[in-house]
């Protein structure tokens, strides 16, 4: 097996199911010399892909000031280093500051995307979050907690769009979130409460928006809970123009 170039590979591990890793992520995990992973967020069975002699470093109890020197030292020792993040690195993974510091240290790095929880949840629910004539926008957001959300992105203002809204990192403040959402979504709007999607102990509950906070509290859900609020979760009859016989495009004439 060919060795990897010495670099940091920031890899999205997906929501938890090893089968949802990208092929590139699997190849990198199988070949890397060093793996740094947040052990509180990455299921152990994903790590079965790694080399038996790879150096495995847990980072859940470490700060960036501790993690960064390990990555830099690994690459400068001509090793390939995988920084494994849950979900997709572009969403709530705190890679922005890592990339800045790696660039300042002249350490080469690459980002490998992963499937996000909202995509895995939609697949489990067997729904499309963009239904013609019903909803065509997906909003990925969170409510303010320890990390403040800019005022222009307040949940109540985003809810005014009545789009398919995916709410991350908000279980501890779900009563507040429910109040803000009810300012614009009807109380009967369906909400999918998705806990640890892709993990062996996954839970998915579909309730009305009015029941969202109570269900969360009854199920005692805190971390790694995603909420999908969407008109698309209710049964509806709609059809895209894309495959309609009366719709013509570059590759097909209409059949009207």
Image (tube, rainbow, N blue to C red):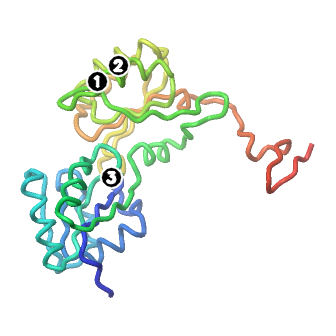
Marks 3 and 1 sit apart, C-alpha to C-alpha, by: 24 Å
Q: Which residue is mark 2?
A: 178
Upstream in sequence: badge 3 or badge 1: 3
Q: Residues within 10 Å of mark 1 (few under 14, many from 20)?
A: many
Task: Report if the CB atoms under discs 2 and 3 are less than 8 Å apart.
Answer: no
Mark number displayed over residue 89: 3
Q: In the displayed orientation, state which residue is furthest to the top.
A: 183
Q: Residues within 10 Å of mark 2 (few under 14, many from 20)?
A: many
Q: Which residue is mark 1?
A: 174
Task: Report if the CB atoms under discs 3 and 1 are less than 8 Å apart.
Answer: no
- Between 98 and 58, the residue placed more toward the observer is 98
Q: Residues within 10 Å of mark 3 (few under 14, many from 20)?
A: many
Where does the image place residue 43, in percent across and percent down from the top left?
A: 25, 57
Q: In the displayed orientation, state which residue is furthest to the right.
A: 256
Task: Report if the CB atoms under discs 1 and 2 are less than 8 Å apart.
Answer: yes
In this picture, residue 20 sits left or right of residue 34: right
Mark number displayed over residue 138: none
Foreground mark, 3 or 1, reads 3
Residue under the image location 20 percent in, 68 percent down: 35
Q: What secondary structure is marked by label 1?
A: helix
Where does the image place residue 18, in percent across and percent down from the top left?
A: 35, 62
Marks 2 and 3 sit apart, C-alpha to C-alpha, by: 27 Å
Quadrant housing the C terminus: top right
In this picture, residue 128 sits left or right of residue 205: right
Q: What secondary structure is marked by label 3?
A: loop
Residue under the image location 22 percent in, 34 percent down: 222
In this picture, residue 164 sits left or right of residue 76: right
Within the image, what quadrant is residue 44 found in? bottom left
Foreground mark, 2 or 3, reads 3
């Amino acid at each position: 097996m060919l060795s990897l170039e010495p670099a940091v590979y920031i890899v999205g591990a997906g929501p938890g199911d090893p089968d949802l890793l990208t092929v590139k992520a699997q190849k990198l995990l199988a070949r890397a010399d060093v793996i740094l992973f947040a052990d509180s967020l990455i299921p152990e069975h994903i790590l079965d892909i790694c080399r038996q002699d790879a150096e495995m470093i847990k980072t859940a109890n470490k700060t960036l000031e501790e993690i960064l020197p390990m990555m830099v030292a690994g690459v400068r020792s001509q090793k390939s280093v995988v920084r494994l993040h849950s979900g997709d690195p572009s969403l709530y993974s705190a890679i922005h500051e890592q990339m800045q510091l790696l660039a300042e240290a002249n350490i080469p790095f690459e980002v490998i995307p992963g499937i996000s929880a909202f995509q895995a949840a939609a697949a489990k629910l067997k729904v499309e979050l963009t239904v013609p004539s019903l909803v065509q926008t997906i909003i990925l957001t969170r409510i303010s907690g320890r990390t403040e959300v800019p005022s222009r992105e307040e949940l109540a203002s985003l809810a005014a769009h009545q789009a398919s809204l995916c709410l991350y990192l908000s279980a501890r403040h779900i009563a507040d979130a429910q109040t803000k959402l009810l300012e614009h979504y009807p109380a009967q709007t369906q909400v999918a409460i998705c806990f640890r999607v892709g993990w062996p102990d996954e839970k998915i509950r579909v309730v009305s928006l009015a029941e969202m906070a109570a269900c969360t509290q009854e199920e005692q859900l805190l971390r790694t809970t995603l909420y999908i609020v969407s008109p698309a979760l209710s049964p509806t009859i709609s059809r895209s123009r894309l495959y309609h016989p009366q719709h013509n495009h570059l590759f097909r004439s209409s059949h009207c």
